[in-house]
Image (cartoon, helix red, strand yellow):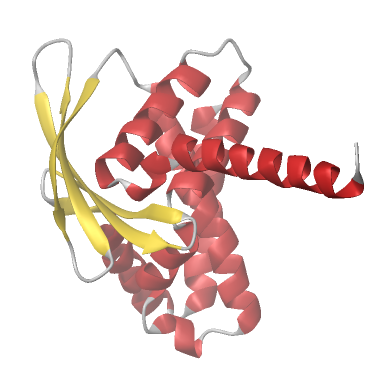
Amino acid sequence: MTICRRRFTALSLTAALAGRAAVADEWRLSPTGVVEKFAEKGITEILGAAISAAEKTARFRALFKEFFDIPAIGRFVLGRFARTATPDENARFATLFEDVIVYTWSRRFGEYKGQTLKVKDNAPDGEDGAVVNSDIVGNDGQTFVVAWRLRKRETGLRIVDVIVEGVSMAITYRQEYATIIQQTGGMAGLLAQMEKQVAELKAKVG
């Protein structure tokens, strides 16, 4: 085989593989696709897997880092206090906030008892985002309304907020942490409280 033919074959193979990858990842550009894939992977690859509690937590962390823009959520939650915090405090906050998200949702997923996520519709949200409306239906017929706010990123759409029965996860954290900062006199108080919260959540998750 000549060099030119080998190069052509290699380029053709690369293009074919890239095309397959693009098709496989089309869900990343679909608001409903992202939410459905998140739920699917959480149930099949974590809850339904015969793995240890530690491995489940590790998989939850990977899952949330893939589907959620945790750094962006953290910046929103900290708000104006990020400007007066030191670089070390901001970095510590980012690490602790990721832990809070991972352990909180690991515990909630751990309470899964066959509930079904039913995506209803989605609507544009700003210039680069969307809101996906869904219901979580329990085996007893009880339904919770859940909305997912997504924003466009380089790798596709990422979740930046979850709104359960009208209550925003991001806004709730923002208000709670602002209160702690004001009551304790600064970031040091918030970080100490978050360290305690992470330790408690970690113990409950097991």
| Horizontal relation, residue 39 to residue 15: left or right | left
Q: Quadrant of the N terminus?
A: top right
Q: Nearer the viewer, residue 44 or 98?
A: 44
Residue visible at 55% across and 57% down in the picture: 96
Quarter of the image with the C terminus is: top right
Q: Residue at x 61, y 71 (%)?
A: 91
Q: Nearer the viewer, residue 134 or 50?
A: 134
Q: Is residue 165 above or below residue 129?
A: above
Q: How many marks?
A: 0
Residue 129: where, in percent of width, then height? 26, 62
Q: Is residue 24 left or right of residue 59?
A: left
Does residue 128 show up?
A: yes
Tell me where residue 117 sits by quadrant. top left
The x, y position of residue 44, in whole percent, is: 45, 18
Rendered view: 43 above or below 48: below
Residue 157 in the image: x percent, y percent? 37, 54
- Residue 49: image quadrant is top right
Using residue 117 as the reference point, say whether residue 18 is left or right of it: right
Residue located 19% across and 69% down the image = 126
Residue found at the very far bottom of the displayed protein: 84
Q: Residue furthest right?
A: 2
Give whichever of 97, 32 is nearer the camera. Answer: 32
Camera sees residue 61: no
Which is more toward the observer, 57 or 121? 121
Residue occupying the point 50% across, 76% down? 187
In the image, is 123 to the left or to the right of 203?
A: left
Residue 165, compared with residue 127, is above or below; it is above
Where residue 20 appears, as percent x and y from the top left, is 54, 35
